[in-house]
């Protein structure tokens, strides 16, 4: 819906003020001009009365034509020289002309009425440009005649016109002064406070509730500002109350979510425990037979080194299966690891040789680059190797058409955070624990000298992990592999093992750009394990 056009408050008030000023001037000018006109006309009428009375007083008695050289004729001549003189007429008792100067109209009704009543009077011409004064002439107490003196009002109209022009000029000057002063006062008293209130309202609408307004002006504007400030204070209190409730709800929701995750994890752990117990029994018995028969055959074929090596490998892999089953059981019911000082460089090479000898890395280019002089880590060698095997197998599975697999190992100080990638909101990075990136791996390390660490990086150029799956990769039984190709326990076991060593495991991945797993382990220094491997 289109908003209707509205004038601003300043324009509305100033236009109203201008209208009031103009209306005031019109009314005042009408009254003033009419009063001035009446005064001028009355003054002219009185002037005519005096002149006519003076002329009548010097007329001869009995009433006759004064003649050329008489005083009355001289007086009439002087009157005729005045610029506003319009005419002079003297008639006898019957209305006949006795004397005239510039007046050929003869006796009119007003003059005849003066002869009849013997009273003075006056009249204005139809166009209002002349005034005529009438007076009777007495001789021995009787009306001997009457006289009419006509005067022009042109000079009075000129005076009125000049007065109008001067008044208009004064009005324009006063209008500008009053309009300017009114605009200034209006701006200070009304407009500026209202604009401050409007600006504060816009900031509050934007979420800034720390606004208070102190404005000058009248009592009404001050009361409005005070009411506005009270409203802001109330809104701020309500907002803080709402935020407090929201924070409480978020905390409660987080606690519920954590409890739910813990419940799910406990259920999964229980399931894993049942599965592990069953596997330990069902797999352990035939596996022990395989290992026994392989040992018997190896003793019988001790003179055949090739077949003896095959049987040794069968025994080693059977032992590794047994350790895997027991590791799964330990995941559900963790047992104390048999820790020792482990040389990471040697362990990486042995693990890579073990898998390469089985043909696990066909069409995969492997690059092993451990630093020289790496400090040992205090860990269970077999469990740590199981972590590496799981990560390497996962990397190979992520590159079905071949690719590049990199294994790095380095050491550094914990004071420089070992995380080369921050926790990003788009899910590209996933740590083993929720507090990993906030604590920067410091708070949860075991007591002792854990200022040094060893970092193992396993990178592949495979398909990567989708962002929606990255947050679940360390959960038991979560897998993106096809049925029959993965149980979803590999990374969960890796995470449990690394956690038991006081370390961290982190995954960085992006769909189509490969995956990097980082394992961070505290060194053996200060762990009470002695030195060397």
Image (cartoon, rainbow, N blue to C red):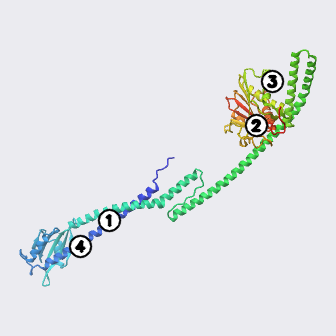
Residue tagged by mark 2? 453
The 10 Å Cα crowd at callout 4, few under 14, some 14 to 19, many 20 or more, is few
Q: Are marks 2 and 3 in contact (CB under 8 Å)?
A: no
Left or right position of 194 against 351? left
Name the front one of labels 2 and 1. Answer: 2
Using the image, determine if residue 224 lies above or below residue 294.
below
Q: Are marks 1 and 4 in contact (CB under 8 Å)?
A: no
Name the front one of labels 2 and 4. Answer: 2
Q: CA distance from mark 1 to mark 3?
A: 116 Å
Residue tagged by mark 1? 29
Residue tagged by mark 4? 43
Question: Circle 1 — which element?
Answer: helix
Viewer-proximal residue among 242 and 391? 391
Label 1 or label 3, whichever comes before in sequence order: 1
Task: Report if residue 106 is visible in the image.
Answer: no
Residue tagged by mark 3? 354
Task: Report if residue 440 is visible in the image.
Answer: yes
Question: Circle 2 — which element?
Answer: strand
* Rendering quarter of residue 347: top right
Label 4 or label 3, whichever comes before in sequence order: 4
Left or right position of 36 against 483? left
Residue at 25% x, 70% y: name it.
40
Question: Circle 3 — which element?
Answer: helix
Label 2 or label 1, whichever comes before in sequence order: 1
Left or right position of 15 against 481? left
Residue at 48% x, 58% y: name it.
191
């Amino acid at each position: 819906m289109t908003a209707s056009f509205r004038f601003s408050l300043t324009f509305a008030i100033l236009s109203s003020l201008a209208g009031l000023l103009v209306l005031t001037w019109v009314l005042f000018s009408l009254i003033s001009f009419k009063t001035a006109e009446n005064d001028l006309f009355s003054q002219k009428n009185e002037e005519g009365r005096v002149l006519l009375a003076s002329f009548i007083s010097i007329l001869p008695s009995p009433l006759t034509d004064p003649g050329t050289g008489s005083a009355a004729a001289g007086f009439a001549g002087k009157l005729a020289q005045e610029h506003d003189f319009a005419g002079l007429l003297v008639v006898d008792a019957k209305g006949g002309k006795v004397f005239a100067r510039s007046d050929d109209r003869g006796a009119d009704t007003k003059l005849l009425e003066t002869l009849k009543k013997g009273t003075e009077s006056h009249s204005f011409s139809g166009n209002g440009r002349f005034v005529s004064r009438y007076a009777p002439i007495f001789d021995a107490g009787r009306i001997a005649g009457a006289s009419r003196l006509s005067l022009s009002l042109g000079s009075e109209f000129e005076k009125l016109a000049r007065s109008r022009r001067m008044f208009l000029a004064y009005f324009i000057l006063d209008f500008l002064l009053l309009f300017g002063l009114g605009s200034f006062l209006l701006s200070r008293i009304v407009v500026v406070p209202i604009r401050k209130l409007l600006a504060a309202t816009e900031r509050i609408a934007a979420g800034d509730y720390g606004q208070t307004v102190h404005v000058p002006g009248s009592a009404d504007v001050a009361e409005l500002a005070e009411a506005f400030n009270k409203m802001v204070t109330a809104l701020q209190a309500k907002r803080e109350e709402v935020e407090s409730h929201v924070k409480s709800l978020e905390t409660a929701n987080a606690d519920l979510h954590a409890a739910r995750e813990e419940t799910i994890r406990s259920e999964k752990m229980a399931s894993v425990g049942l599965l592990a117990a069953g596997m330990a029994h069902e797999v352990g018995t035939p596996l022990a037979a395989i290992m026994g028969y392989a040992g018997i055959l190896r003793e019988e074929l001790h003179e055949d080194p090739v077949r003896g090596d095959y049987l040794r490998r069968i025994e080693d892999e059977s032992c590794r299966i047994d350790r895997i089953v027991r590791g799964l059981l330990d995941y559900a019911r963790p047992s104390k690891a048999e820790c020792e000082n482990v040389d990471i460089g040697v362990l990486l090479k042995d693990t890579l040789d073990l898998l390469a000898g089985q043909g696990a890395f066909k069409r995969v280019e492997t690059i092993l680059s451990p630093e020289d002089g790496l400090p040992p880590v205090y860990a269970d060698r077999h469990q740590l190797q199981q972590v590496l095997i799981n990560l390497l197998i996962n990397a190979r599975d992520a590159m079905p058409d071949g690719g590049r697999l990199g294994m790095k190992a380095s050491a550094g100080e914990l004071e420089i955070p070992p995380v080369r990638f921050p926790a990003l909101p788009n899910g590209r990075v996933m740590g083993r624990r929720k507090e990993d990136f906030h604590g920067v791996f410091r708070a949860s390390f075991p007591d002792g000298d854990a200022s040094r660490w060893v970092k193992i990086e396993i990178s592949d150029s495979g398909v990567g992990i989708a962002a929606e799956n990255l947050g679940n990769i360390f959960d038991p039984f979560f897998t993106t592999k096809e049925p029959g190709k993965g149980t979803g326990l590999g990374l969960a076991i890796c995470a449990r093992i690394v956690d038991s060593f006081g370390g961290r495991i982190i995954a960085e991945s992006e769909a189509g750009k490969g995956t990097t797993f980082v394992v961070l382990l505290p060194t053996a220094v200060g762990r009470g394990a002695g030195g060397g491997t």
